[in-house]
Amino acid sequence: MSAQLSLNWLHETLTQLPDHQQLQSVLQRIAQQTGASAVLFNAVGEMRATAGPAPARLIWEALQPHLHENERDASAALPVLRVGRWQLNPLITGTRSAAHVLVLATLDRRAIDETTKLVAGTATTAVLSALQGLDSTRIRDRADLLTTLEQGIPRDRESRFWPRLVEFGFIAHAPFVFVTGVPASPSADASRVVREHITRVGGAEFGVLFADHLVSAASDEEFHALVADTPDARAWLDSLGEHHFLGISGVHSILTDVPRALREAELAKRVAADFGAALHESPGNPAPPGAQVHYAQLPLRQWLTATADRGELAARRRRILRAFDDQPELLHTLAVYLASHMEIPATAQHLYVHPNTVRYRLGRIEEALDASIRDPQLITDLMLCLEPRVAALQLQPDHS
């Protein structure tokens, strides 16, 4: 193909793209122009589009060793390959952040000239770049809409926002929940995780608005989502919760409730994070990588501690528990005793000690506190102080 013909073909191809299936349209035009089969793979071997009868799976298997070589030397061109009677002319295309491989496959060793390959690659890259830009725009649109809802909308304007939510998979006036979370691992790449989950949700059968960073976030790693309350969405949240501390609001169906749902999710996430920290600190406890807490299921004691001022709560806990500053064994015994429903035999079994040892330690605990641990008011205070640790201990096999 001459240079002028190539430019004309490229211009015509890109100006006549349909509104849908643009990759498929480009590959069909490439196949028609070159008389070759055209197959487009992403970086992990998923076929994005194809035109013609070439055996796509066999082609990918033949390509893989040479792609690994290309990773070591990015300047190395992919070689012409053979699969049965097919001659493969592969080239790297797409954007730097989303590389693809376009293969022009011909029968009986028919060559594809470099100009034709260059034009085919340019057309494919142009469409991939446009589609990537569209995805980025939709992600920004989700985040902008979510920000507006978080800040609160008047009740008389709610009808204007449901159609926008429908564009992102929601059903108008159907129930939804708000979710906030942070990675369970401090070293986790939060932004990468968020991008992965946005990608996974892209084709999901439920509505979601997803963004990293809250309007007012305590941490740069926080993310948040408005999610349709459906079985598919709940399964997705279970997956997300494997590696995050998640707070999930109560179920709502009115968009003016979004700020309230956000506050509920934040409180539940606070409990999840405290619970997760206690799991990691609990001796002998194989801590799961994440935890999720539902606001509607919070016991009263957890709701009270979550709603309290964090600094004031820490100070009051400190005043009660400082009696154990130099006696960590007594503090652990007390936590196990509370987790064991204040039953001495169960406490002894969990600690691997004799029941009389537990009784002795409980006596020392009462001396340290200068109060009886049979006093309901003291027990209430101790439970509020040790709630995350007690909940973590109750997950251990001895407390099941």
Image: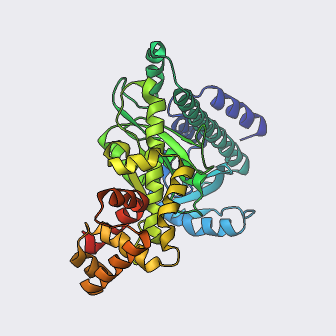
Quick check: can you spot residue 110? yes
Count of residue discs = 0
Q: Nearer the viewer, residue 148 or 99?
A: 148
Q: Nearer the viewer, residue 24 or 233?
A: 233
Q: Nearer the viewer, residue 344 or 247?
A: 344
Q: Position of residue 293 (x, y in %)?
A: 38, 50
Q: Nearer the viewer, residue 211 or 383?
A: 383
Give the residue at the far front of this rendering: 370
Left or right for 400, reference 327:
left
Residue at screen point 72% across, 63% down: 74
Residue at screen point 52% across, 62% down: 318
- The quarter of the picture where the C terminus appears is bottom left
Give the residue at the far top of this rendering: 156
Residue at screen point 72% across, 64% down: 76
Q: Position of residue 214 (x, y in %)?
A: 58, 40
Left or right for 238, reference 106:
left
Q: Position of residue 331 (x, y in %)?
A: 42, 73
Residue at screen point 42% across, 69% down: 369
